[in-house]
Image (spheres, rainbow, N blue to C red):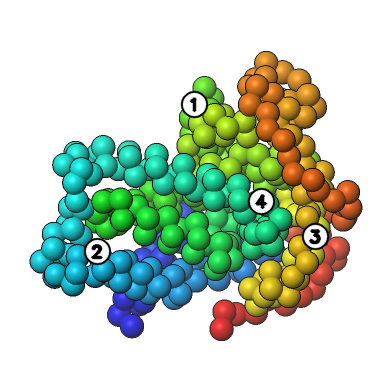
């Protein structure tokens, strides 16, 4: 119980800090100037922000504890030594280098996990994250529990098994809160020449557009270089992302409905109906910058041709209230 309370307080502190930092940036250098700081779906996103403290934190501790117990045969001294410094060869490296390696390896794994969640088998879990019609820092936490467990807890457990100390993960908490919030924030930053190395807000906002506009590109959570290497980098010149959401437009707008959405719709209707290959993206936006996309072209899976009506990003929450379903929000059980 104390662990949950401590996690809630930590989350509340970071929630408040992110709200201040990214609200100020959204006012000073907004990507979409007309987008309000508190959106129609912000209350729902707040629930998702605090869900890890109640559900995932205990689950993560249980998984890590069980793994350490099995790894070290229940030897408390060996477990304590590992928690403090990990084990060789990772433990012999300087702490800063361990941090860099952890970021590079975990980001590589999450890149491929993210791409798999855009496939037909797992899309309905990930569609929850893509469902908002307006994107800001709060959307960073909107993940279905299955998506979160696979993308975060599974990767974290794997990194520990590779020898990275759990203490290192505690050090990454501030980085994760701030960077995930930044790439979702309503901020007009591209990072200039570093955009091929690090994910920027504009880079990730393209990922939240419709599937035929960039929604099947830019999968890396932190290191955009993986998208460049594997042919999924998309940031056209002199153009900014506009429409957000999912093509099928059937994702419930309440918390409980979203939890059951992937299970109550067993026949996955591939909403990636207009997905293009990287080469087709390059041809649709001809420029020297996009030539790299064509060079790394990969075939796209067969998809449906049906497209549902989507709400344009210009229909901001303060004027769009009458055009969207009036499903009430439901608190987490």
Q: Which residue is mark 4?
A: 118
Name which of mark 2 and mark 1 comes first in the sequence: 2
From the viewer's side, name the closer residue of 208 and 37.
208
Q: Give the residue displayed 26% in from the left and 42% down from the top.
A: 98
Position of residue 137 relative to residue 287, above or below, is: below
Q: Which residue is mark 2?
A: 71
Name which of mark 4 and mark 2 comes first in the sequence: 2
Please, which residue is most extreme toward the top here?
288
Position of residue 69 relative to residue 114, above or below, is: below
The percent position of residue 255, horizontal first and vertical second, equals 64, 74
Q: Please tell me whether mark 4 sits on a helix, a strand or a loop.
A: loop
Confirm whether residue 251 shows in the render.
Answer: yes
Q: Which residue is mark 3?
A: 269
Q: CA distance from mark 3 to mark 2?
A: 42 Å
Q: Please tell me whether mark 3 sits on a helix, a strand or a loop.
A: loop
Position of residue 46 relative to residue 194, above or below, is: below
The percent position of residue 178, horizontal first and vertical second, equals 44, 49
Q: CA distance from mark 1 to mark 3?
A: 37 Å
Q: Quadrant of the N terminus?
A: bottom left
Name which of mark 1 and mark 4 comes first in the sequence: 4
Name which of mark 1 and mark 3 comes first in the sequence: 1
In the shown orientation, is residue 307 left or right of residue 93? right
Mark seen at residue 194: 1
Name which of mark 4 and mark 3 comes first in the sequence: 4
Label 3 environment density (alpha carbons within 10 Å; few <14, some 14–19, many ≥20)? some
Q: Please tell me whether mark 1 sits on a helix, a strand or a loop.
A: helix
The answer to whether the residue labelled 2 contacts the one labelled 1, judged by CB atoms less than 8 Å apart, is no
């Amino acid at each position: 119980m104390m662990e949950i309370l401590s996690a809630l307080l930590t989350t509340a502190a970071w929630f408040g800090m992110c709200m201040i930092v990214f609200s100020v940036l959204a006012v000073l250098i907004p990507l979409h100037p007309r987008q309000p700081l508190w959106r129609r779906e912000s209350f729902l996103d707040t629930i998702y922000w605090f869900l890890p403290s109640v559900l995932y934190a205990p689950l993560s501790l249980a998984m890590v504890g069980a793994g350490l117990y099995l790894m070290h045969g229940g030897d408390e001294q060996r477990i304590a030594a590992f928690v403090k410094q990990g084990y060789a060869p990772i433990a012999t490296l300087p702490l800063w280098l361990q941090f860099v390696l952890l970021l590079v390896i975990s980001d590589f794994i999450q890149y491929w996990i993210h791409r798999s969640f855009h496939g037909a088998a797992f899309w309905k879990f990930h569609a929850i994250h893509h469902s908002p019609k307006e994107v800001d820092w709060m959307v960073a936490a909107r993940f279905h529990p299955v998506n979160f467990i696979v993308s975060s807890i599974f990767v974290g457990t794997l990194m520990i098994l590779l020898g990275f100390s759990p203490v290192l993960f505690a050090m990454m908490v501030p980085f994760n809160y701030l960077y995930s919030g930044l790439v979702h924030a309503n901020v007009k930053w591209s990072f200039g020449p570093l955009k091929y190395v690090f994910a920027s807000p504009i880079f990730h906002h393209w990922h939240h557009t419709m599937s035929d506009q960039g929604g099947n590109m830019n999968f890396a959570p932190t290191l955009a270089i993986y998208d460049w290497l594997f042919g999924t980098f998309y940031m056209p010149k002199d153009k900014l992302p506009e429409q957000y959401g999912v093509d099928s437009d059937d994702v419930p707008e309440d918390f409980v409905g979203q939890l059951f959405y992937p299970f109550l719709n067993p026949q996955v209707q591939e909403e990636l109906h207009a997905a293009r290959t990287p080469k087709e993206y390059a041809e649709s936006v001809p420029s020297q910058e996009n030539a790299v996309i064509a060079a790394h072209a990969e075939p796209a899976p067969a998809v449906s041709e049906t497209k549902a009506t989507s709400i344009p990003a210009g229909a901001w929450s303060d004027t769009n209230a009458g055009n969207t379903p009036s499903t009430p929000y439901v608190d987490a059980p």
